[in-house]
Image (cartoon, rainbow, N blue to C red):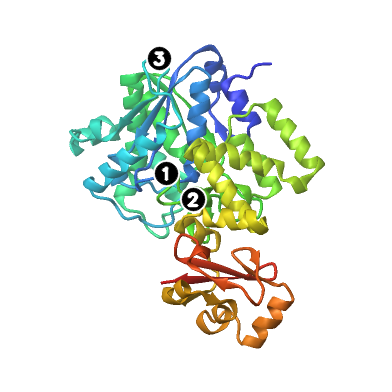
Amino acid sequence: MKLNFVQELKWRGMIHDIMPKTEEFLKENKISGYIGFDPTSDSLHIGSLVQIMTLVLFQKHGHKPYILVGGATGMVGDPSGKSKERNLLDKKELNKNISAIQKQLSKFLVFNDSKNSAVIVNNNDWFKNFSFLDFIRDVGKHVTVNYMMSKDSVKKRLETGISFTEFSYQLVQGYDFFWLYKNHNCLLQLGGSDQWGNIVTGTELIRRIDGGSAYAITTPLVQKADGTKFGKTEFGNIWLDAKKTSPYKFYQYWINSSDSDAENYIKIFTLNDKEKIDGLITKHKTNPGLRILQNALAKDITTMIHGEDQYIAAKEASSILFKKGNDAVIALKSLSKDVFLEIFEGVPQGKINKDEVLKGMPIINALVESSGFLKSNGEARRAIGENSILLNKAKVDLDTIITINDLIDDRYLLFQRGKKNYFIVLVN
């Protein structure tokens, strides 16, 4: 049975709240709907992917997606989900961020001359000439302070204090919905569950000003099984921009998902249909050690964001730790400096003068005196005799001489003792 848009969101676990009669209306009509994106950075991160995928599915089902980039609201600040006032950006930085975000979104949505082509709009276009007095007369008079105070995003901030700027945000976002309703016949707003109050303010404005009906759907905030925040690591956000988060680290985030998270993520962040995903889940449960779900998830999402070549490179880099012998040596030497250092992030480092390597450096000298990896010549000899020392993943003996040909990216050597004890040597 072919699923409609709302049914597909439901089985993917992508509905938190839905306004009454929304599903029935969408079943009978192809409509325009929108999601707003916050331009506080020059890249979206994977926390935005739920909303992006919601728009992708919306367009797939024949509806017309609008992407609102908040050039005006980015200068105000949304209190939803925030515990304190945030820093506001200047116009120049906002415009730079908006341009970058528009470019990223074009990877996901179809922008052409078709009936349901995606459209990007910037709310600064309708707010820049809207005076404060006009706004409070034409918009503010339709919403009571009591109504605005009842919103969770406001109530949670009353004890610590909330500025008028952020207090009024729901009116500004509500007017976005009204403006798109009047000028583009946008009848649906989608967003994260923390946006429900702001979205409903928009439907209220449409009803009170124009007497019209509009609809709302929110998605749940994605939670990781271990309780930690989705999209965050100890190093910060996982960004969609390769300059902020490399394809290797991006791939690593998904491939290291837990079984329960991977089962959840593959429904939300890929376009595989129910039959295929159910099949992958069944295969995975038969042999969890093969990590079928994680591999399928990492492949699909890395390819979608960074392209197939970057996916293949990230997968190959990830396999280096498990390679041995000549295959490992070749793979290591193919790595760029950045990827090499990412794979071995946090590994202790030492330095060797390049002149010593150019002359040919005995392995014992490299392990002890020059790099400081091992404490003594005796310890180095014993470790080599036990076959526990590797140079660039290849075994060495007491006669091994390190030459310029051993360098990774013309500057690094990788020593290993045992299975997990790594040491990087910078040759400069």
At x 37% / y 24%, what residue is drawn? Answer: 206
Q: Secondary structure at mark 3?
A: loop
Instruction: Report the front residue among 108 and 11.
Output: 108
For the view shown, which residue lies furthest in the top direction? Answer: 28
At x 53% / y 57%, what residue is drawn? Answer: 333
Residue hosting label 1: 44
Residue hosting label 2: 238
Along the polypeptide, which appears first: circle 1 or circle 3? 1
Q: Secondary structure at mark 2?
A: loop
Along the polypeptide, which appears first: circle 3 or circle 2? 3
Q: Estimate the x, y position of residue 180 in percent, counting from the top left.
A: 34, 25
Quarter of the image for residue 226 reads bottom right
For the view shown, which residue lies furthest in the right direction? Answer: 286
Residue hosting label 3: 114
Q: Amino acid at mark 2?
A: Ile
Q: CA distance from mark 3 to mark 2?
A: 33 Å
